[in-house]
Structure formats: structure tokens, C-alpha cells
């Protein structure tokens, strides 16, 4: 199975719920991409949004696990896997979307908007980013898109909207391969 068919297969067949929410991980990622589209984002960013939590699928799929020691976090696991197939403009914001949450949570307003599950995971992810690390992050090439991805991610948990199918994104995915 080629990588695009494999990704589509996983989107269709993985029924796991997104932690603490009423949508599945697949629905959550598709919604994140839909929000990026509505915001007239670049195709690179839409593609990043669509795949940003793909690491959760890998963690659940023994066939995809690099069997040895896999003690990464979902953003690293997704990044390490996807970078073998997709352009860096697509995979870098995926790598940094958790750092973006830690960066944004320095602001009280953003922190208060986080769901309970997201506040708990923030602690596990290292908590709010300090000043020095924040400055370093701001210098990264994909800082802006990582922040945008994170903001779309945060609101992509609705159960009352008409969802697109992963099949509708097949061409977009194919056109962002290495
Ligand atoms: Fe997410």
C-alpha cells in the first residue's frame, strides 16, 4: 500500500476519540484542515493541519511502530514518520504544534480557553514555555505556521458541522509528497 492510501485507510478505520472530546482523532484532524481552508491558509498549512495528530495513529498501530524503543511524544512520532514522505513545510509545524501550545499558554486569555483535557496535557508536555525558550521558538522558520496550526487545532472539536471526507483531501496529500 502506498503512503497516501495508507494514510486514508487509517483515517477511515481509526475510531479512537480525541482525548477528552466527542470527536474522533480523524474528525478532529479533518476539522483542523477545514478551519485552515476557511481561513484561506496556504496548501502547505492545510496539509500540516490535516496530519498534525497523525502520531496518535502510529502509536496505536503496531505495524507502523518502529518496534524497538519508541518513547516519543505524538508530535515527534508523527514528525519522524511523516518527514520520510512529506515536504518540510508540511511536517515542521506538526513537530512544533505542542511547543506552540506551550508558547501560547503564557497568555492568560489563551490558557483559560483550553479544555480541561488540554490543560492536563499541557502539564505533561512541560507546562508554559519560559521566556528564553519562547524567544528561541520565535526565531524558527515555521514559528508562524506552528502557531496558526495550534489555534485551528484548539477549536476543531465540534460535533455539529458537516464534515468533509478524507478522500476529498487525496489530491492535496499527493501533491505535498517529497
Ligand atoms: Fe490536535
Image (cartoon, helix red, strand yellow):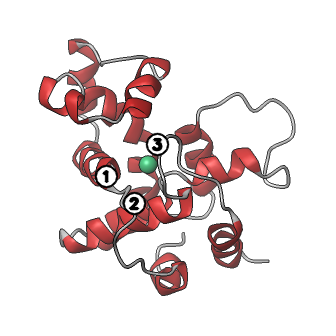
Q: Which residue in the protein does label 3 denote?
A: 95
Between marks 1 and 3, how big is the CA–CA gap? 11 Å
Which residue sits at x=50%, y=20%?
124
SS at badge 1? helix
Mark 3: few, some, or many residues within 10 Å (few <14, many ≥20)? many
The label nearer to you, 1 versus 3, is 1
SS at badge 2? helix
Q: Which of disc 3 and disc 2 is earlier in sequence?
A: 2
Instruction: Point out residue 102 in the picture as x, y percentages from the top left corner.
Output: 32, 27
Which residue sits at x=50%, y=81%?
165
Between marks 1 and 2, how big is the CA–CA gap? 6 Å
Instruction: Point out residue 154 in the picture as x, y percentages from the top left corner.
Output: 31, 47
Q: Is mark 3 within 8 Å of ligand 1?
A: no
The label nearer to you, 2 versus 3, is 2
Circles 1 and 2: CB atoms closer than 8 Å: yes
Instruction: Point out residue 150 in the picture as x, y percentages from the top left corner.
Output: 31, 46
103 on left or right of 12? left
Does residue 168 sit above or below 173 in this rendering?
Answer: below
Q: Which of disc 3 and disc 1 is earlier in sequence?
A: 3
Task: State the residue in front, 9 or 161.
Answer: 161
Q: Quadrant of residue 85?
A: bottom right
Q: Which of disc 2 and disc 1 is earlier in sequence?
A: 2
SS at badge 3? helix
Which residue sits at x=74%, y=48%?
60
Q: Which residue in the protein does label 2 denote?
A: 49
Q: Quadrant of residue 30?
A: bottom left
Task: State the residue in front, 139 or 70.
Answer: 70
Instruction: Give residue 149's mark.
Output: 1
Instruction: Give residue 26's mark.
Output: none
Q: Is mark 2 within 8 Å of ligand 1?
A: no
Does residue 90 sit above or below 141 in this rendering?
Answer: below
Amino acid at each position: 500500500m502506498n503512503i497516501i492510501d495508507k494514510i486514508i485507510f487509517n483515517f477511515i478505520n481509526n475510531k479512537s476519540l480525541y482525548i477528552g472530546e466527542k470527536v474522533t482523532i480523524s474528525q478532529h484532524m479533518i476539522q483542523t484542515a477545514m478551519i485552515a481552508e476557511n481561513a484561506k491558509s496556504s496548501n502547505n498549512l492545510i496539509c500540516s493541519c490535516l496530519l498534525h495528530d497523525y502520531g496518535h495513529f502510529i502509536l496505536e498501530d503496531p505495524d507502523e511502530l518502529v518496534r524497538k524503543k519508541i518513547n516519543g511524544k505524538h508530535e515527534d512520532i508523527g514528525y519522524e514518520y511523516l518527514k520520510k514522505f512529506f515536504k518540510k513545510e508540511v511536517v515542521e509545524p506538526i513537530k512544533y504544534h505542542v511547543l506552540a501550545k506551550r508558547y501560547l499558554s503564557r497568555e492568560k486569555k489563551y490558557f483559560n480557553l483550553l479544555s480541561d483535557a488540554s490543560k492536563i496535557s499541557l502539564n505533561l508536555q512541560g507546562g508554559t514555555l519560559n521566556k528564553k525558550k519562547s524567544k528561541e521558538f520565535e526565531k524558527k522558520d515555521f514559528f508562524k505556521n506552528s502557531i496558526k496550526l495550534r489555534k485551528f487545532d484548539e477549536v476543531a472539536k465540534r460535533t455539529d458541522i458537516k464534515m468533509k471526507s478524507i478522500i476529498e483531501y487525496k489530491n492535496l496529500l499527493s501533491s505535498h509528497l517529497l
